[in-house]
Image (spheres, coloured by chain):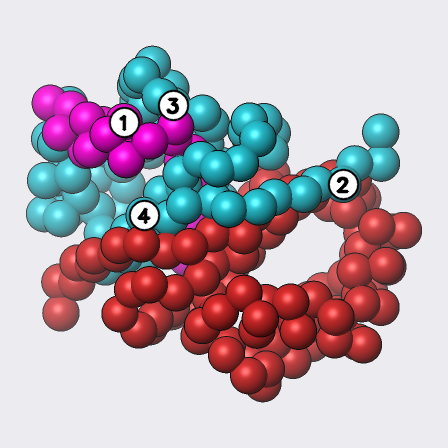
Chain colours: A cyan, B red
């Protein structure tokens, strides 16, 4: 997974920070499927994810409307429900306006 | 590391996404020291971090002024320079206004 190649600011970020329950319980497969499904949504700009003790997934979007539509996607609603029932001990979602960004690359 | 216990919105987030070079080269020790130093800064609200292929560190702040002051901190400037010289193949920093948040916990 590369660093998301997002457009010029402003755009939106959804920071999803989570702590998993024990065991996979279908989580890995669903997480991959959700990344694939998000990438097909209108207004999707990119995604970045890593997990150690905490899991942090940041998805990038062109507007609050695109974020709201993805939140209401049928397969995503099902994943959210299973997330609360089985996969997550706790999580926090933060909806953010990215005001500025800058990057560095050795290449 | 728990999920950051941030206050009511609005507040700011700095999303720092990075890809490391090979080898530690003092990175682990400096990363821990920088988290400790950031936590002592005025306006610091919390931090979350995870690394797999990508490293994602999100720090939370009360204002753009607090973010700017931490960016100019002497020890942090030195770490940023060594980061570009040695530790990071590439990185992207995004300065964000957190407009809304919501959370879930089984407890």
Crowd class of label 2 (few under 14; some 14 to 19; many from 20; radius 10 Å): few
Q: Position of residue A76 (x, y in %)?
A: 18, 28
Residues behind callouts 3 and 1 on a single chain: yes
Which segment is the magenta one? Answer: A51-74
CA separation, marks 3 and 2? Answer: 23 Å
Secondary element at tag 2: strand
B88 horizontally vs B17: left or right: right
Quadrant where the image shows the C terminus of chain B: bottom left
A98 horizontally vs A100: left or right: left
Secondary element at tag 4: strand
Q: Is residue A32 visible?
A: no
The answer to whether the residues at label 3 and label 1 have Cβ atoms under 8 Å apart is: yes
Residues behind callouts 4 and 3 on a single chain: yes
Please tell me the numbered disc located at residue A104: 2
Residues behind callouts 1 and 2 on a single chain: yes
Q: Which residue is mark 1?
A: A66
Label 4 vs 1, first from the N-terminus = 1
Q: Which residue is mark 3?
A: A44
Residues behind callouts 4 and 1 on a single chain: yes
């Amino acid at each position: 997974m590369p660093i998301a190649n997002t457009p010029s600011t402003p755009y939106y970020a959804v920071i999803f920070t989570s702590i998993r329950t024990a065991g996979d319980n279908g989580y890995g497969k669903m997480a991959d499927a959700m990344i694939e499904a998000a990438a097909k949504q209108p207004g999707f700009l990119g995604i970045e994810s890593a997990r150690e003790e905490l899991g942090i997934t940041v998805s990038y979007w062109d507007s609050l409307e695109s974020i709201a539509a993805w939140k209401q996607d049928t397969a995503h609603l099902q994943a959210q429900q299973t997330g609360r029932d089985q996969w997550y001990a706790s999580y926090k979602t933060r909806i953010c306006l990215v005001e500025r960004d800058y990057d560095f690359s050795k290449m």
